[in-house]
Image (cartoon, rainbow, N blue to C red):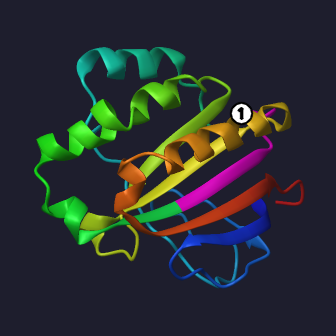
Amino acid sequence: MWRVLAIRPVLGDTLPQAARVAVCRGDEPTPLKSQWILSGVISNVRYVERPEQQELTLKQAPLGRSEATLAALIPIRKTAAWWNLTQEERRSIFENKSHHIAEGIRYLPSVARQLYHSRDIGEPFDFLTWFEYAPEHSEAFEELVRTLRKTEEWQFVDREIDIRLMRDSKG
């Protein structure tokens, strides 16, 4: 259970304000009356070459660490132009030009992350990006977000909401 600190639209429409967010896995029922529900699935890794995947696996911290009391949920939708590109063209923009993986690796293991895919299950966002980090790594997380939002890849984002959270001790 997470207490909402802020819900800020970055691009496009926002979501209604909410006081708390519950992260439910699988068929777990939500413990809250819902203002909104976002759904996604963990899928196969995309746009990642084997050496990158191995480095991510080695450096990635697990979610749920006791010291990681801050989180960010960032739902993102990309434009039709993005999805009209071939996978090779998207990979070129994603990593060769925007350095998404290389930038992200710089912040591991301080920032743990999980990507949920939503596009293929008919949700309003393409991705739900979930990050957890300790308070002392807040500025590093902000730097990561600023860096990625300046890339060519982000020119293909047409809806993004930045939801900041704190672990709810009452949860």
Residue occupied by mark 1? 140
Q: Position of residue 119 (x, y in %)?
A: 30, 66
31 relative to 125 in the view: left or right: right
Residue plotted at (44% across, 22% down) = 56
Pick whichever, 37 or 24, lies toward us. 37
Q: In the image, which residues are magenta?
A: 64-74
Q: Secondary structure at mark 1?
A: helix
Q: Residue at x 49, y 29 (%)?
A: 103
Task: Report x, y in % for residue 50.
Answer: 25, 19
Residue 167: image x %, image y %?
Answer: 80, 52
Q: Is residue 106 above or below residue 67?
A: above
Inspect the image, locate mark 1, and give the three-letter code of the amino acid beneath it: Ala
Q: Quadrant of residue 76?
A: bottom left
Task: Identify the residue at horizontal 23%, vertical 70% (top origin).
Answer: 80
**Furthest-right residue in view?**
170
Mark 1 Cα-neighbour bin, 10 Å: few <14, some 14–19, many ≥20: some
Q: Quadrant of residue 124?
A: bottom left
Magenta-colored stretch includes residue 37: no
User: Which quadrant is home to the N terminus?
Assistant: bottom right
Asked if residue 81 lies left or right of residue 6, the reply is left
Q: Is residue 71 magenta?
A: yes
In the displayed structure, would residue 90 be above or below residue 122?
above
Above or below, 108 relative to 9: above
Q: Is residue 30 visible?
A: no
Q: Tell whether 121 sits left or right of 64.
A: left
Q: Quadrant of the C terminus?
A: bottom right
Q: Is there any visible trace of residue 58 in the rendered image?
A: yes
Up the image or down, 62 lies above or below 50; here it is below
| Residue 41 screen position, x and y as percent | 37, 56
